[in-house]
Image: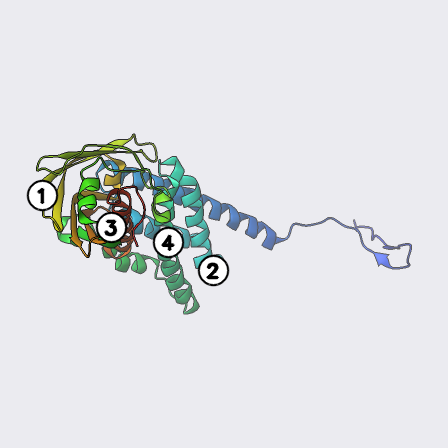
Amino acid sequence: MSTPETNPEPNAEGRIESFGPVESTPSLTRSGATRSIGIAFLVTALILAAFIYRVLRNIGMMHTSLIFLGIPLILGALLAMAPRPKSATGGILRGIALALLIVAPLVGEGYLCILFASPLFFGVGLLVGGIIDISRKHKRTVTLSCVIVLLPFTLEGTTPQLSFNRTQFATATRIVNAPAAQIVAALAQSPQIAAPLPRFLRIGFPRPLSATGSGLAIGSVRVIHFTGAEGDPPGDLTMRVVQSDLQPASGHIHFETINDSSKLTQWLRWRSSDVSWQAIDSTHTAITWRIGFDRQLDPYWYFAPWEQLAVHQAAGYLITANTMPHGQPGS
């Protein structure tokens, strides 16, 4: 039996319109499926990144390059294997941004860690994505090769043999408007913490809440009580005078750390403070404050400059706050 033909009818403007069933476009169906698979890859990558972080934290590797380079490398590789977006780099960077915004708070990291980790994460994502995008233009697949080549760089800090020297020193020198005798009197008092911290040290580092202890004789103790951070409780940095050389126009005091339960240990371990001064004239004294510390974070090339900056500013702050009789900054 033949199917009757349907004659199209003209519309009000005289044009003929045809009505019939609307079929789904195959390209739209494929696009929706690709998007769903991409979301599944992203969720899997985020869950795996959180799991790896937890494992590394439990085995004491949370300060190593495995955290700051290894996790973004794995994220980038997984996201690159998702259905191909127009740009692998764009897909990887979007995934890393979501990881930092969603996963990091869930595993207990605060905004300060995210702030310092994000350049490393995005840098690794740019590197991996750039390599993959270039390889795709040449019809090659290099995701696995990229991971293998970059993997050794994520192992820094996992063993002493794979670590750079952690001991560092930061020094600040100021000329203050006070005679040497007043400098000695100020140093003999309890540490002063009322002066505002430098701007960089106010971005989320632990802050001193109180300080006790006085005297410059060998054995004299200073205790500085710091705020907690990112869920950790407050803690104390305790230092003791182990060398004391007091001359009329010059002098030197050496403090060594005897205990540190502060949150500072997540970043560095404060080893020592050396304070030396030399009278320039009857009303001016040159003061040098040198702090020794052990860097706790890897990779070296990224975190060493940041820690050096932070401790250098701390040394300058200690001169300003603790060597002026009335807490006034020197010239």
Rate crowding at label 1 as few (under 14), some (14 to 19) or many (20 or more) other CA atoms within 10 Å. some
From mark 2 to mark 1, how far is it between C-alphas?
63 Å
Disc 3 vs disc 2: Cβ atoms closer than 8 Å? no
Q: Name the residue: 13% across, 41% down.
A: 256
Percent position of residue 296, x then y: 22, 46
From mark 3 to mark 4, how far is it between C-alphas?
14 Å
Query: Is 75 on the left or on the right of 223, as rendered?
Result: right
Q: Name the residue: 18% across, 48% down.
A: 180
Q: Compared with residue 160, is residue 15 higher up or lower down, i.e. above or below?
A: below
Q: Name the residue: 33% across, 52% down.
A: 73
Which SS class for mark 3?
loop
Rate crowding at label 3 as few (under 14), some (14 to 19) or many (20 or more) other CA atoms within 10 Å. many
From mark 1 to mark 4, how far is it between C-alphas?
43 Å
- In front: 124, or 88? 124
- In front: 169, or 136? 169
* Res 87 label: 2
Q: What residue does disc 1 label?
A: 244
In which quarter of the view is residue 182 placed? top left
From mark 4 to mark 2, how far is it between C-alphas?
20 Å
Q: What residue does disc 3 label?
A: 298
Kindly identify the amino acid type of the residue bearing the numbered disc 1: Ser
Kindly identify the amino acid type of the residue bearing the numbered disc 2: Ser
From mark 1 to mark 3, how far is it between C-alphas?
35 Å
Kindly identify the amino acid type of the residue bearing the numbered disc 3: Asp
Query: Is 317 on the left or on the right of 244, as rendered?
Result: right
Disc 2 vs disc 1: Cβ atoms closer than 8 Å? no
* Res 119 label: 4
Look at the image and tell me whether residue 292 can be seen.
Answer: no
